Amino acid sequence: MNRKVQIRKYIEKDIDKVIVLFKDSVISNCKNDYSKEAIDAWTQCFDEDRLDKIFLENYSIVATIDNEIVGFGDINIKNSYLNCLYVKPTYQRQGIATLICDELEKQVDSRIDVHASITALNFFLKRNYDLINKQEVVRNGVKLTNYVLQKDYKLTNC
């Protein structure tokens, strides 16, 4: 990666760009793992105000390059739940998800839980998360497969 990635706290005015990035990421990156129906249900299942509220309550960050948001993630510190981690499709496989995840993991001192998509499963397994179980969640009436994973705090600070 030639340009420097900056990590900063999420702010309320980021919501529109974050939502576009989220949708683009799911549509582009998950098309080999989920049906069009599942992707449509997934990308249309949220309320913008509710999502913004969650990001403001959680420890939420964005990754930027030249002031362009290229990734984002958040973790609920109280519950040690890694809620979101997405990277813009044109910036995939450049270490941005790793930078975001590293920063999120530093915020907690207990076991971290995450529900990962089929697409993201290997990313978390490579980060020493343990696979707990496979599950199906329903979004807008459509079943989507994801995985419950956990990471022991001791491994996050190696």
Image: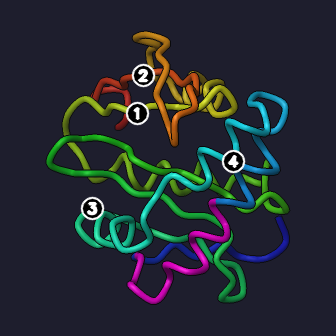
The structure residue drawn at horizontal position 30% and vertical position 41%, both measured from the top left corner, is 81
Q: Earlier in the sequence, mark 2 or mark 3?
A: 3
Asked if labels 1 and 4 touch by Cβ distance under 8 angstroms, the answer is no
Dividing the picture into quarters, in which one does residue 111 lie? top left
Q: Earlier in the sequence, mark 2 or mark 1?
A: 1
- For the residue marked with disc 3, what is the amino acid? Asn
The structure residue drawn at horizontal position 49% and vertical position 49%, both measured from the top left corner, is 101
Name the side, left or right, on which 118 lies relative to 124: right
Name the side, left or right, on which 8 lies relative to 28: left
Whether the magenta-drawn stretch holds residue 73 is answered as no
Identify the residue position indicated by label 4 in the image.
40
Q: CA distance from mark 2 to mark 3?
A: 19 Å
- For the residue marked with disc 2, what is the amino acid? Leu
Name the side, left or right, on which 5 lies relative to 106: right
Q: Is residue 14 above or below residue 80?
A: below
- For the residue marked with disc 4, what is the amino acid? Asp
Q: Which residues are magenta?
A: 10-22
The circle drawn on residue 58 is 3
Image quadrant containing the N terminus: bottom right
